[in-house]
Image (spheres, rainbow, N blue to C red):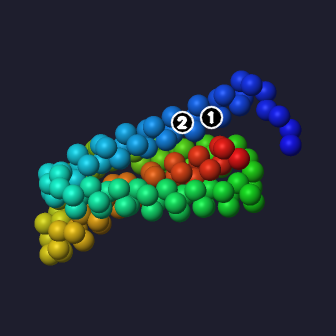
Amino acid sequence: MKRLPPVLFFSIYACSFLVGAVLMGFEMLGSRYLFPYFGGGIGTWASLISTVLCALAIGYFAGSAIVARHPSHRAIAVAILIAAAYLACVPATADPSRHPVLSELALPPAVASSIAAEVVAKLPAFAAAGSTAQLTR
């Protein structure tokens, strides 16, 4: 296997670290989006954490499958851009899109908080994990 130049080696791992740090920060921020509707109890946190962990597992699997078939920098960039675009849209659309849906559906709180956590956190966690799997190959 060919050794990478030290600058490229460092930049790949720095990018992976930053993507992971942003994702973890967004998980903490995601709890603030769920708090007005579901409170800050254990059920809300369990929904958010389980959603993020599930998305990470699927993202790592999908990312490694993509890089095994199509090893390119473009796939990494697309995964990071998808996660970044979604994260940029969440603050503007979180309350306007969630309030009508949650007020009209008569779901138990555990189910509703799980659905809301998936809407907030699933796609960015999936895309970020996919990019990390590709970056560290």
Quadrant assignment, res 73 = top right
Would residue 38 be found to the left or right of residue 81 on screen? left
14 to 67, vertically: above or below: above
Residue 1 in percent (x, y) is at: 86, 43
Name the residue at the top extreme. Answer: 7
Which residue is disc 1 drawn over? Answer: 13
Does the rendering let one see residue 27? yes
Nearer to me, 62 or 73: 62
Residue 135 in percent (x, y) is at: 65, 43
Which amino acid type is shown beneath numbered disc 2? Answer: Phe
Residue 59 in percent (x, y) is at: 54, 58
Q: CA distance from mark 2 to mark 1?
A: 6 Å
Circles 2 and 1, Cβ within 8 Å, touching? The answer is yes
Name the residue at the front extreme. Answer: 42
The 10 Å Cα crowd at callout 2, few under 14, some 14 to 19, many 20 or more, is: few
Q: Secondary structure at mark 2?
A: helix
Which residue is disc 2 drawn over? Answer: 17
Would residue 27 be found to the left or right of residue 98 on screen? right
Which residue: 62% across, 56% down?
A: 63
Which residue: 59% across, 46% down?
A: 132
Q: Secondary structure at mark 1?
A: helix
Q: Count of labels shown?
A: 2
Does the rendering let one see residue 96? no
